């Protein structure tokens, strides 16, 4: 690259400080996360890889440094993995992360957070690893949400859920979104049950929300843990999906339908 303006811009971005915990520190390696520089540098550096794969006639897709190459057999996959690794390390002087590289069926791998089904006409789906990362993030938020007002807590969850479903708006397999919605509602019921604390308080709230006296008393004093009660029929009855929608909880399934309908 000979354009001095572009080189100067890249240099300034790389030298920009790192903002963390309210403090700015000097960056010693890497590029700013989430910025446009990483894809730009990857495309400049890996343009030769694209041309090599095209020359060989391989079907492939690449974004930044994430690349999937599609062949017909495992033997062909192993051969291509070895030859492309050699090309990257010897020709382009790059180091291949072999822990993240593998020969496998397309539906056993992920690309940019997506995976696909094994059908003759594959359908896009959110990769299992992506779903687990979302659940891990939400679990951290739920731990912080104990004792919080449920309506305000649902508002804090909203940007996380909207951002996630916006990214996975291309997914064609929708079952996982329904499952996630149910899991999130159960986690909220668990928070509510913990907040009620005593049997007497639980009985009072269950009665107020519509359970008859006998069932409310039996449920309030059943001696089971919060997670069990969060999935039990009495909590599902007094806190159905529509009640959570009323307090502003974002539904992944409904959001996906709305996003796909508008595109």
Image: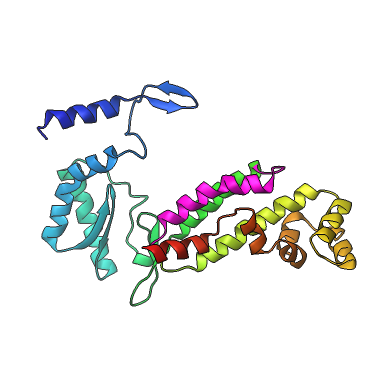
Could you say which is closer to the camera, residue 208 or residue 18?
208
Kindly identify the residue that appears in the image at 18 percent across and 63 percent down.
58
Q: Is residue 171 visible?
A: no
Q: Quadrant of the C terminus?
A: bottom left
Kindly identify the residue that appears in the image at 27 percent across and 37 percent down.
37
Q: Is residue 84 visible?
A: yes
Picture layout, residue 224 above or below residue 42: below
How far from the left and from the top, in percent, is residue 64? 27, 47
Q: Quadrant of the N terminus?
A: top left
How far from the left and from the top, in percent, is residue 151? 65, 48
Kindly identify the residue that appears in the image at 82 percent across and 55 percent down.
205
From this viewpoint, which residue is outermost toward the bottom?
A: 120
Magenta stretch encompasses residue 152: yes
How far from the left and from the top, in percent, is residue 235? 74, 62
In the rendered structure, the answer to whether residue 88 lies left or right of residue 102 reads left
Q: How many marks?
A: 0
In the rendered structure, the answer to whether residue 186 lies left or right of residue 177 reads right
In the rendered structure, the answer to whether residue 109 lies left or right of residue 52 reads right
Magenta stretch encompasses residue 110: no
Could you say which is closer to the camera, residue 201 or residue 93?
201
Q: Which residues are magenta?
A: 145-170
In the rendered structure, the answer to whether residue 84 lies left or right of residue 111 reads left
Could you say which is closer to the camera, residue 258 or residue 84?
258
Report the predominant secondary structure element of the magenta stretch.
Answer: helix
- Give the colour scheme of this rendering: rainbow
């Amino acid at each position: 690259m000979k354009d001095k303006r572009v080189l100067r811009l890249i240099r300034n971005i790389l030298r920009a400080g790192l903002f963390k915990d309210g403090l700015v520190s000097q960056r010693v390696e890497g590029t700013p996360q989430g910025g446009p520089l990483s894809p730009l540098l990857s495309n400049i550096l890996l343009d030769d890889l694209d041309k090599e794969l095209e020359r060989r006639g391989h079907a492939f897709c690449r974004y930044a440094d994430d690349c999937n190459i599609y062949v017909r057999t495992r033997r062909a996959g192993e051969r291509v993995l070895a030859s492309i690794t050699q090309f990257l390390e010897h020709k382009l002087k790059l180091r291949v992360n072999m822990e993240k590289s593998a020969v496998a069926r397309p539906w056993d791998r992920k690309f940019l957070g997506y995976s696909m089904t094994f059908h003759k006409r594959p359908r896009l789906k959110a990769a299992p690893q992506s779903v687990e990362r979302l659940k891990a993030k939400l679990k951290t938020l739920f731990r912080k949400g104990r004792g919080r007002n449920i309506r305000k807590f649902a508002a804090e969850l909203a940007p996380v859920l909207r951002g996630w479903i916006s990214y996975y708006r291309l997914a064609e397999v929708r079952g996982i979104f329904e499952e996630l919605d149910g899991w999130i509602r159960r986690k909220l019921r668990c928070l509510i049950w913990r907040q009620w604390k005593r049997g007497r308080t639980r009985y009072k709230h269950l009665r107020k929300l519509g359970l008859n006296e006998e069932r409310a008393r039996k449920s309030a004093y059943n001696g089971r843990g919060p997670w069990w009660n969060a999935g039990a029929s009495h909590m599902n009855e007094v806190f159905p999906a529509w009640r959570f929608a009323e307090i502003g909880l974002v539904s992944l399934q409904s959001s996906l339908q709305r996003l796909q309908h508008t595109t």
